[in-house]
Image (cartoon, rainbow, N blue to C red):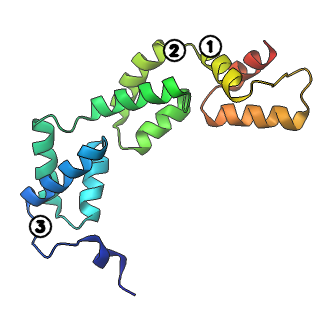
């Protein structure tokens, strides 16, 4: 069985900044990436570090790649869809390669526009329309609380929303 690295590069051409740039541009045409994530994908594709760095610098100079734009779009999308909130959103941004200082700045702006209690109520109504905390059993309550905690909501806010 061939090794994993032997399957990565389909081209027999040597690594070059131009080829790395073209490959990265094809990736960016499909979806946004952070520079760290894109650098990893280029290295996984067996481009040299120098070629990957040159391609990323060119993409940033041409405004094809922008970590701030990625972080803002990701945070807005995650908050609007109710996928992540608070600490979980912070973890997801860091996992995608957004620098810590940029995460702090973007979340400071994004979370200021959202009310945690209101977001909780919206998610509860959408995901658990029949849920009634007074009539629900312990297992059902744990399931709902666990779901909301995995989204990043605080336990105090969850209990407050459930009781309301």
Q: CA distance from mark 3 to mark 1?
A: 51 Å
Q: Which mark is residue 118?
A: 1
Residue beneath the point at 47% across and 39% down: 92
Element marked by disc 1: helix
The relative height of residue 134 versus residue 68 in the rendered view (above or below) is: above
Residue that badge 3 annotates = 15
Assign the N terminus to one quadrant of the image: bottom left
Q: How many marks?
A: 3
Residue at which label 2 appears: 114
On-image quarter of the C terminus: top right
- Give the residue drawn at x 31%, y 76%: 7
Label 3: element kind: loop
Location of residue 25 in the rendering, given as x and y in whole percent from the top left corner: 18, 48
| Quadrant in the picture for residue 130 | top right
Give percent across and percent down for residue 98.
Answer: 35, 38
Question: Which callout, 2 or 3, points at the residue further toward the start of the chain?
Answer: 3
State the separation of the CA atoms marked 2 and 3.
Answer: 46 Å
Find residue 137 and name its label. none
* 72 sits to left or right of 160: left
Cβ–Cβ under 8 Å for marks 1 and 2: yes
């Amino acid at each position: 069985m061939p090794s994993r690295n032997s399957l990565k590069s389909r081209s027999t051409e040597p690594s070059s900044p131009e080829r790395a740039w073209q490959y990265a541009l094809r990736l960016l045409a499909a979806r946004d990436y952070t520079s760290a994530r894109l650098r990893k994908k280029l290295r996984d594709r067996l481009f040299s570090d120098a070629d990957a760095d040159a391609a990323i610098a060119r993409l940033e100079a041409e405004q094809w790649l922008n970590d701030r734009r990625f972080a803002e779009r990701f945070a807005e999308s995650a908050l609007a869809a109710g996928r992540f909130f608070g600490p979980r959103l912070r973890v997801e941004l860091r996992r995608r390669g957004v620098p810590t200082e940029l995460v702090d700045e973007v979340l400071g702006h994004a979370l200021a526009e959202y009310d945690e209690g209101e977001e909780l109520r919206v998610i509860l109504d959408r995901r658990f329309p029949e849920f009634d905390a007074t009539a629900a059993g312990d297992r059902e309550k744990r399931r709902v609380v666990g779901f909301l905690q995995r989204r990043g909501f605080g336990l105090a806010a969850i209990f407050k929303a459930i009781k309301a």
